[in-house]
């Protein structure tokens, strides 16, 4: 049973046309006024959108955060005016006419591509192709998972995606579609804007795919329709909605539909139609109203679509209020952490400080997960085919699959990009706190989605193990060298590189507490000692860096390191101490958090004497803190295949090299 | 007609088995000795490999660089011992037994994953999954293209790929397979190691794809075989080789075949089998020889496969010697630039200095391409569906497609990752000099392949336009902010960000001359003035940075900038000059090249007075050159949607901000 497939009523032909035209005209006029943008897609998909919004999409503009709403994802984000027109016409209060008039202008919510957080009704930030499609997979996973937890009464909705030819060409769509097919995500329905046009021209120039066959090969349901025939569209959507499999609805459309000379051509894709063509569209569809004027009857009609959801919302609210699961539900959706978590993490930290295991930080991560997973039921993990290498799975986690959506661990397969994009979708959906793992070097494979998580400011946790040449024999293709710098360069992404079991627990705690953006935990393959041997309730990693070992007298040098290099730093300090050179060791589990501290704190921790930074990566991200008399010991080129020990020696990341660097400089 | 499909003779059953066993045993023993590595794949694919090398692959171990050899690509690079065993057994002199014994040890050529350049016979560096598969697409394009130029006599070979389940899960394989199907690359044959096992366990855990159907949907030919039945394998390969379409040969194999308890299981994938299992394999296949001892008859048999190609090579060499195209062929394959190029570039630079156009550097790039394309016939361009935005196509370039492999421009479609991986394949193939374009922000989509180009040290040129917030209204999803830093962090990648038409011509010249690694040209969407108004024959960009405008007296400040920010720097200098503050403007078209200069030169150019760096990106990559009294003016977070002018003002990358920064500091 699906609620949404029986939700709306078909409009009359005339009503349909008036709304579809309103969208087309608003879109072309906004682009014309902005003198930039993409009119072709909204004009081509307005018929499909009207059918979806009038008959199928379950939404309530007065409650854009309704947890059980259908999600509408514009994966083809360049067609943002389609979304903005729909939100405006159906009565989202966040979107005034003024906003439409100032499309693509600084300071307005109507950005060139839809931006999550800037405007209610925008479910995810799109523009980079394929991302919305893959976000939707995560949303559909979250929906089924929460349905198991909370039942049909509270969670029972659909995810609708508008995807372009470009979305489907991106490799990401392959990974995501394959995953969705495998998981049998019938709640995901993709409206493919099959207009056979991309920027360079006809898709014949670049593709000979039989897209329908491709999706069938993933285990999808496929149906097609004339994307300009409302009845035909409704019929196809109805069929899709009744399907157990995810559906691809192949909507045969004409890009720039209605534009007398530019329709069906790539010139209508990404530039204003021009004054003449705009006038010709008006004439062709008999639209006499000036730009941004919507006649009252059409306006009312649009609002009536928005009002359809009010009753559904009220019923749902009532069900929630009467539900025994209300409290849990609200806490899950709100994303607040259970109070008992802090205590459990502290107990674990204390135990690690006492037991002082010599283990890889990837193992430390698994150990703290064993503590967190039972307490934090929202946590939903996975790995891109590296579960036992990333140590991302704990015994108590059942697998999430098509037979058990209640499971809390996902085998994502060798699909790093889809994994991260799906994780973004889960975080956007709310109700779960997603994490996933791969090797740190393969952040390159999923970087576009990591960036979007940072841009959207959503809580996603990425467990990236094998974080340096320390992984050894797999060699330079697997050894991250530039990755710590290149990830730290991404705004609003926090990279953690903990040194031991205690810092790893602290990193997990901070990543969970960080609701304004994603976190990466960069973890070792190789064993490292416990260096935090005195227990501290306070999360010392929270400021990013701190003095781990004080100088025994007036500080003459600071050895600043992170992760696996802390062990070497401590050994170097011991040797320098023996020689009477008072040295401090500074641990920097998160350079990102550290850089956000007051200059006073930074200078206090790093000290004003000689600084030697040690990290098995390139120096770029540390340069800010290194003066002419300081030193960096790390990597300046790619790694090599050999044992961990050999490689550290070969690349001169050694105790003696640190000691010498200090002695040469003091 | 194909030469390679009729090239070899089938071995007897016994011969086949002895070679297949030799590969399996060498592989498992090398992994055992290294105590790390991947025995399962070589043991599972040894039968397929023996059939391929004995009956189909056209190669000559004495001439590993034979331009018309078949290419053998181990896309599943973790199975490196399969390749090393084959190279050793067939007589590649570069690979001694000593190398096999020191598999995965520092200082040896037998790295954990095959490394291009480290060992003859390794056609590309693989390990990150899907890359070899996509490289092969580029090689197959290069083969057909050169076939048109030089005819069947000189270029007429095949590309064979061994791909894993993991390779086919990666999104990259979708893009690459779709492109290969579209271009009808019948010379590409993929041997899919269909063992239904990945690291996390059975592929059933993660995938329900009908892979054969998927490849049929791309327009591929598909055939399957029992991957342990030599006759069946040969039959399938023969069918594939006779096909006009690219072929997927679905080889049903057993991972770790021959290992009594571990065969068919994921535990045989990525760890030594262990002493007991190794002994059990020996017993099971009746192999009594100690590790790394190959009995003479098997050794001779292996060498005889390697000798098969000698005659073919000699015939080919004779054809080349007698060919009227010899000189052109040798020059193309050698990759040497035509002598007339320098003169033409200089004439263009001079013309730009005189005409001083105010154009975007993406347009400048097109203008210099118009000069280069007719001279440098090896140049083969393209774009990932942004031809008119990247300005990568010039009128004289015909399209390369299945009806015209002689064309010199490829519409890659919305497939950034496959484009770059294919470009890598073309550069590796030799005979063409490939370039391709997308938006700078989408380097994230193809970063794994960019990194591999840098690691391999091959000449690829990436035209990455829309290089900052200057692109305007498309907003933060499209505006690179961290990309200049994150790309400059990749070792052996040179990023150019030219300021005008002259520097863009110089960047192109340097990128073409740079044979030891890839280059990126980061180019503006918006117009910029010509700032190099005095012609210099010398390529001023070759040192990465230079004083563009001298201080009018003793230098009190240096404004250091790149690309579009040079215009602002010059305006600020003019204002400071008026106020009597002698300021120099330093242009840094390539920070990477600049950092490779002697400290003396760097200090000379940057000066010892106040430095203000201006670049519309994050500061990380510049920190090395900024002291406490210096300033950086750029971005510290994501961009926004608005006009270029608005955004520069909003983010305070302005003349007045530069002027104030200087004045506050002197």
Image (cartoon, coloured by chain):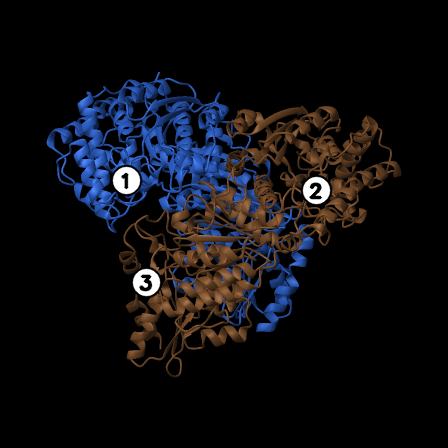
Chain colours: A brown, B blue
Q: Is A49 situated above or below B454?
A: above
The single residue placed furthest to the right in the displayed view is A296
User: What distance separates the C-alpha of mark 2 from that of mark 1?
Assistant: 56 Å
**Depth order, front residue of A8/B463:** A8
Which percent across, then down, holds residue A265? 66, 28
Q: Which residue: 70% across, 36% down?
A: A4
Mark 3, secondary structure of its residue? loop
**Depth order, front residue of B215/A410:** A410
Q: Pick whichever of labels 3 and 2 is earlier in the sequence.
A: 2
> Left or right of B188: which side holds A259?
right
Q: Which residue is under mark 2?
A: A36
User: What chain does mark 1 sit on?
Assistant: B
Mark 2, secondary structure of its residue? loop
User: What chain does mark 2 sit on?
Assistant: A
> Left or right of B338: which side holds A659?
left
Mark 1, secondary structure of its residue? loop
**Depth order, front residue of B573/A517:** A517
Q: Is A29 situated above or below A435?
A: above
Closer mark to the observer between disc 2 and disc 1: 1
Q: Which residue: 27% across, 33% down?
A: B257
Q: Which residue is under mark 3?
A: A653
* Disc number placed over residue B39 in the picture, else none: 1
Which percent across, then down, holds residue A478? 37, 48
**Depth order, front residue of A572/A201:** A572
Closer mark to the observer between disc 3 and disc 2: 3
Q: Give neighbour class at mark 2: few <14, some 14-19, many 20+ (Cα, 10 Å).
A: many
User: What chain does mark 3 sit on?
Assistant: A
């Amino acid at each position: 049973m699906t609620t949404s497939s029986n939700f709306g009523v078909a409009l009359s032909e005339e009503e349909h046309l008036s709304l579809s035209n309103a969208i087309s005209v608003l879109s072309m006029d906004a682009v014309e006024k902005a003198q930039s943008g993409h009119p072709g897609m909204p004009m081509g998909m307005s018929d499909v959108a009207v059918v979806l919004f009038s008959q199928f999409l379950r939404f309530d503009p007065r409650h854009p955060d309704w947890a059980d709403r259908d999600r509408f994802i514009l994966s083809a984000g360049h067609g943002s005016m389609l979304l903005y027109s729909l939100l405006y016409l159906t009565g989202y209060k966040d979107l005034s006419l003024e906003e439409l008039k100032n499309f693509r202008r600084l300071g307005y919510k109507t950005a060139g591509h839809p931006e999550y957080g800037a405007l209610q009704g925008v479910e995810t930030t799109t523009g980079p192709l394929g991302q919305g499609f893959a976000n939707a997979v995560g949303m559909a996973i979250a929906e089924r998972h929460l349905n198991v937890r909370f039942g049909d009464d509270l969670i029972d909705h659909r995810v609708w995606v508008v995807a372009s030819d470009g979305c489907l060409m991106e490799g990401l769509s392959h990974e995501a579609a394959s995953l969705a097919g495998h998981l049998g995500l019938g709640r995901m329905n993709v409206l493919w804007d099959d207009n056979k046009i991309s920027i360079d021209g006809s898709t014949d120039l670049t593709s000979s795919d039989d897209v329908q066959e491709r999706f069938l090969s993933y285990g999808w349901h496929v149906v097609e329709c004339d994307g300009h025939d409302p009845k035909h569209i409704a019929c196809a959507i109805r069929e899709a909605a009744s399907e157990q499999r995810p559906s691809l609805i192949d909507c045969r459309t004409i890009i720039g539909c209605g534009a007398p000379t530019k329709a069906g051509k790539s010139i209508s894709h990404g530039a204003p139609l021009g004054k003449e063509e705009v006038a010709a569209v008006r004439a062709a569809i008999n639209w006499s109203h000036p730009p941004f004027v919507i006649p009252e009857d059409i306006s009312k009609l649009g609002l009536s679509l928005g009002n359809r959801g009010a009753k559904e919302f009220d019923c749902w609210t009532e069900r929630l209020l009467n539900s025994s699961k209300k409290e849990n539900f609200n806490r899950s959706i709100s994303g607040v952490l259970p109070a008992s978590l802090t205590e459990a993490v502290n107990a674990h930290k204390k135990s690690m400080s006492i037991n002082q295991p010599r283990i890889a930080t990837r193992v430390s991560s698994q150990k703290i997960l064993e503590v967190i997973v039972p307490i934090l039921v929202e946590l939903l993990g996975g790995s891109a085919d590296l579960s036992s290498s990333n140590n991302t799975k704990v015994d108590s986690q059942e697998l999430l699959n098509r037979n058990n959506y209640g499971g809390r661990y996902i085998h994502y397969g060798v699909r790093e990009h889809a994994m991260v994009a799906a994780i973004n979708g889960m975080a956007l959906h709310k109700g779960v706190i997603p994490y996933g793992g791969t090797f740190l070097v393969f952040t390159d494979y999923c970087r576009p989605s990591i960036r979007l998580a940072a841009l959207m400011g959503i809580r996603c946790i990425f467990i990236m193990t094998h974080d340096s040449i320390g992984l050894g024999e797999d060699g330079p293709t697997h050894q991250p060298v530039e990755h710590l710098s290149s990830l730290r360069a991404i705004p609003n992404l926090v990279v953690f590189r903990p040194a031991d079991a205690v810092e790893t627990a602290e990193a997990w705690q901070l990543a969970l507490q960080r609701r304004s953006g994603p976190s990466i935990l960069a973890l070792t393959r190789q064993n490292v000692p416990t260096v935090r041997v005195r227990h501290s309730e306070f999360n010392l990693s929270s400021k990013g860096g701190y003095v781990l070992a004080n100088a025994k007298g007036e500080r003459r040098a600071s050895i600043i390191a992170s992760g696996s290099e802390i062990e070497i730093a401590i050994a170097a300090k011991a040797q320098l101490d023996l020689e009477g050179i008072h040295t401090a060791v500074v641990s920097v589990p998160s350079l990102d958090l550290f850089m956000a501290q007051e200059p006073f704190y930074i200078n206090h921790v790093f000290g004003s004497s000689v600084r030697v930074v040690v990290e098995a990566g390139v120096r770029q991200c540390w340069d800010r803190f290194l003066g002419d008399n300081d030193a960096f010991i790390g990597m300046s080129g790619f790694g090599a295949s050999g044992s961990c020990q050999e490689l550290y020696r070969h690349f001169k990341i050694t105790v003696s090299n640190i000691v010498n660097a200090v002695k040469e400089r003091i």
